[in-house]
Image: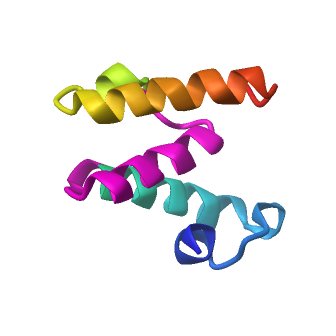
């Protein structure tokens, strides 16, 4: 659903470079203003999957539970081989 929202498709291989850049920029903007913890974490995970997420300490400076969840997410993905 999030890919459809930001990129109008779930297949990122089909997204034109300019639309990809705009979508990634919009995700970052939405992350910066999001107040609901679950949605904010989901946006961070999407940015991480796209290779644009800031480190957990910078992303969740004032939210220690979200920072810990993001650090756990990174450890889990590394263990699975999805660095």
Image vertical order of residue 3 relative to residue 51, above or below: below
Magenta span of residues:
32-54
Reply yes or no: does residue 31 show up in magenta: no
Q: Quadrant of the C terminus?
A: top right
Q: What's the residue at 44%, 53% (across, down)?
A: 43
Specify whether residue 79 is in view: yes
Residue 81 x %, y %? 81, 25
Q: What's the residue at 77%, 31% (across, down)?
A: 82
Q: What's the residue at 28%, 51% (across, down)?
A: 37
Specify whether residue 60 is in view: no
Using residue 50 as the reference point, say whether residue 26 is left or right of it.
left
Using residue 28 as the reference point, say whether residue 8 is left or right of it.
right
Using residue 43 as the reference point, say whether residue 49 is left or right of it.
right
Reply yes or no: does residue 51 show up in magenta: yes
Residue 18 x %, y %? 62, 62
What count of labels does the image hold? 0
The foreground one among 14 and 58 is 58
């Amino acid at each position: 659903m999030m890919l459809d929202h930001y990129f109008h498709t779930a297949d990122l291989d089909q997204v034109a470079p300019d639309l990809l850049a705009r979508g990634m920029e919009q995700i970052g903007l939405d992350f910066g203003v999001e107040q609901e913890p679950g949605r904010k974490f989901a946006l961070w995970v999407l940015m991480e999957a796209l290779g644009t997420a800031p480190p957990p300490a910078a992303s969740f400076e004032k939210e220690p539970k979200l920072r810990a969840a993001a650090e756990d997410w990174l450890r889990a993905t590394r263990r699975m081989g999805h660095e």
